[in-house]
Image (cartoon, grey):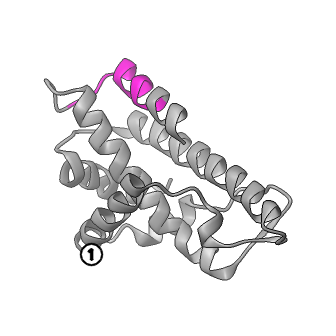
């Protein structure tokens, strides 16, 4: 992640959930987004194949109601923080042997933003008594997302 982007991500976590994060947390965050986008595309690939297509459409990705709501929250926050250029770099589509439709590729940064909002809010729930989640609390949040995505 570019150094210029670190202050924007710090600002994003404060706006999304009132949390203070640092450079080490942003490394964890980057790994989280990569892993969860990969997981979504893994299922998206299977869904596309099950529907007789050789291209991943947006509806193939298993986006839950909660994740969709987080995408909407992200869109509102993004207007003020302007994270889209950074998420464009971060949200590279995982390679799973199947192409993604143009709509799917364009949706990835917003989907990464929705995952970001959901993660920030999950961390806030886990770390209720602090503005600065510990490494263990980040790990707990990741375990929860692994159960759901």
Left/right of residue 111 with respect to residue 131 in the rendered view = right
Instruction: Write the residue at 55% across / 41% down.
Output: 31
Instruction: Write the residue at 48% across / 57% down.
Output: 2
Picture quarter containing residue 123?
Answer: top left
Is residue 143 positioned above or below 13 on the image? above
Q: Is residue 35 magenta?
A: no
Instruction: Write the residue at 54% across / 33% down.
Output: 146
The secondary structure type at the circle numbered 1 is: helix
Residue count near mark 1 (Cα–Cα under 10 Å), binned few <14, some 14–19, many ≥20: few
65 and 140: which one is in front?
65
44 and 114: which one is in front?
44
In the rendering, at what x and y percent does residue 112 appear? Answer: 48, 58
Farthest residue to the left: give it: 129
In the rendering, at what x and y percent does residue 134 appear? Answer: 31, 22
Farthest residue to the top: give it: 136
Q: Which residues are magenta?
A: 132-142
Farthest residue to the front: give it: 51
Q: Read off the residue under disc 1.
A: 79
86 and 77: which one is in front?
77
Is residue 108 positioned above or below 25 on the image? below
Instruction: Write the residue at 84% across / 71% down.
Output: 54
In the rendering, at what x and y percent does residue 72 appear? Answer: 32, 67
Can residue 6 be seen in this snapshot? no
Can residue 20 be seen in this snapshot? yes
Give the number of callouts.
1
- Quadrant of the rendering where the C terminus is positioned: top right
Left/right of residue 63 with respect to residue 141 in the rendered view = right
For the stretch drawn in magenta, the main secondary structure is: helix
């Amino acid at each position: 992640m570019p150094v210029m982007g670190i202050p924007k991500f710090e600002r994003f976590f404060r706006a999304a959930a009132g949390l203070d994060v640092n450079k080490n947390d942003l490394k964890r965050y980057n790994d989280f987004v990569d892993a969860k986008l990969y997981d979504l595309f893994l299922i998206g690939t299977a869904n596309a194949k099950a529907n007789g297509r050789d291209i991943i459409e947006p509806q193939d990705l298993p986006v839950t109601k909660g994740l969709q709501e987080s995408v909407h929250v992200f869109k509102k926050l993004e207007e003020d923080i302007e994270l889209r250029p950074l998420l464009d770099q971060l949200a590279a589509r995982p390679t799973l042997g199947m192409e993604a439709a143009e709509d799917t590729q364009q949706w990835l940064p917003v989907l990464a933003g929705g995952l970001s909002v959901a993660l920030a809010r999950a961390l806030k729930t886990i770390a209720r008594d602090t503005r600065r989640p510990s490494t263990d609390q980040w790990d707990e949040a990741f375990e929860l997302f692994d159960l759901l995505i």
